[in-house]
Amino acid sequence: MVIVKNLFKWVAASLIAVVTLLSAVIIYVSLSVDINGFKADIESLARQQGLDVAIGGDVTSIFFPQPGISIGQVRFSDMHATSGTLDDLTLTVAWTDLLSVSGHPTRLKSGSVRVSGGQILYKAQNNLPVQLGNISLLSHNISLEGNAFPLRISGQAFAGQQFSLETDIAITANGPNVERLVLTDLQISIDQIEINGQVEASKNLTWIQGNIWTNIFDFKQQFQAIKTFIPALALPQTIQPSALTELSIKSRFNINLDANSEINNVLNLDGQPITIDMRVDQYNNKLTTAIAADLLKAADYMPSINTTTEADNSSLFAPLAIPFALWQGQSQVEVDIKTIQFDDFAVHNFYSNVFGNQRILSLTSLNADVFNGQINAIAKLDMRSSTPSFNMQPSLKGIDMALALPALAGYNAFKGTLSLDSNIQGAGDSMDSIFESITGAGQFDIKSPSYADINVEQTFCNAATLFGSRGQSNKNLPTGTDLDDLSGSFQVSQGKLSINEYSTGTGNLSIMGRGTVALLKGTYNIRANALLDGTTSSSNGCSVNKRLQNRQIPFICKGSFDGGSTECKPDERVLKELLKNTALEALGGQLLKSRNNGSTSEEDNTDPLKSLLNDYLKRKLEE
């Protein structure tokens, strides 16, 4: 609207020049006078209206069918945001106006403006340029008394795309100032995008209201033009090829440049209506945006696994930068979406509230229902550098891991209800770099955990046989393991999740230990110490040698979340020491028995060490 205001201020100034010059030419000056001598007068009149105009071409007179002037190679600027060049500008007025207005353009009843060639550049305070090239403009029956007249503009915009504007415009001017401007039957075309509506600006163009709407267009095809002005944006190939191919916009606005403004928008994205309501507090320089939707099919817009590149990942935080690119003051974004649908799960009742200032985002609230539990978080995102950094304090309550792990990691061997609190920090512009940079710590608690890949009790019983224990058949034990409630603490560093201390149990076994999860590789290495409280591993388990009772047996469990093999076995280094001690104890017992019996029979004189080894090998073969 500022462009329109400056344009018509300049046209008004030029019309003053037309009336003045032609009056002088017709009444006082002979036809032999060179009208180019009035260039300085035209430029001076423009400067009085706040426009810097320089005429590089010739100025020629036009007398028929209407009097006027043609000016070549005009360079202009409002010395703020608007500038450009016009190859040829033609201004005419009706003969009746020429004889009656006494040089005052607000009394004009008819006139015309024609522009052939040139460009206009508008650069806003946020440094985002809007440029029109190869301009063609035509308007006739111009009136500055509020009567509507046609305006036609065409050219190239947004990296060479064809642009056109057609409307009936009514202008009410008071001297060089435009007090009121009305655009009716507005039709704007930018490549495949068609915009229709009506706009009214009053109070010296400081109050603007109206509504506009677009056709349904393919956003993917139009995106490259947007990328020209915001290079940081990238559009990855989506899993769903039809995603982002149907977009339409409806907007109703009431803008007061001196007070508060409201802009209400409805985006219909691939059949999903999304409301975006914006409020602008001019006095406090604050923009508030509220985004709401009933359903967002997020799975359709995820990057394709086969086509995702580092360039695609680099745009991870780019959409968050858009409010800062368009608004230099304080901003607040409130998001309320009833359901966000992914492939294998859905997030319900998603709500977030974000405050931003100077490219720093503060997430004061994030709430959502997912996997039969809740997610809460507060966070801070700093985008002042090329590598965004963040600090996040997430909290999970009652997350059903039987639903979460298959959906997020493709892993279904572990079940339980997870609660977690943590504080983590990181930086990066891609998922890989973010995972590698994350540091932090937290606590977790899992109610009724269950591990399907391995039966921990059976593994313990197998290990116990190495020490002389005898147990029931393995077929009496279930395939997996139901554990007692599991709790512990963890740290995150260099792409690894380190579980510092955890404790759980199964049957008569108490289990404690620590472990490591490689976040990028999706592998884990868990160390566990099993401590038996009783003579059997459980009511249906194995009997255990008293040497192993109330004694920690160390285990190492390794595996991956991608469905790979999982193994869990005693720690070989510690096991050798236990076997050594057990062998010595058994050997000593055999020697003592032999010595006490004093027997000389062949059976009693059997080498006790050989007997021990034979017994051990026999048990191993029976397994």
Image (tube, rainbow, N blue to C red):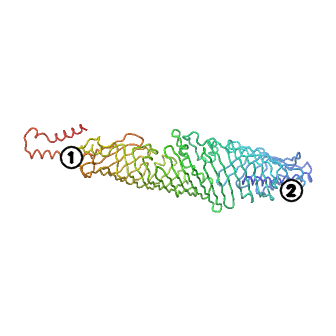
- In depth, the one of 514 and 297 nearer the eye is 297
- In depth, the one of 115 and 217 nearer the eye is 217
Tell me the tag on residue 582.
1
Residue 99 vs residue 210: left or right? Answer: right
Residue 398 vs residue 241: left or right? Answer: left
**Res 562 visible:** yes
Q: Residue 303: percent from the left, percent from the top? A: 53, 42
Q: Image quadrant for the C terminus?
A: top left
Question: Which residue lies at the image location 64% right of the left edge and 46% below the top edge?
Answer: 248
Identify residue type, mark 2. Answer: Gly
Secondary element at tag 1: helix
Residue 527 vs residue 402: left or right? Answer: left
Q: Residue 364: percent from the left, percent from the top? A: 52, 58
- Of badges 2 and 1, the one in the foreground is 1
**Count of marks placed on residues:** 2
- Crowding at dot 1, Cα within 10 Å, few <14 / some 14-19 / many 20+, comes out as some
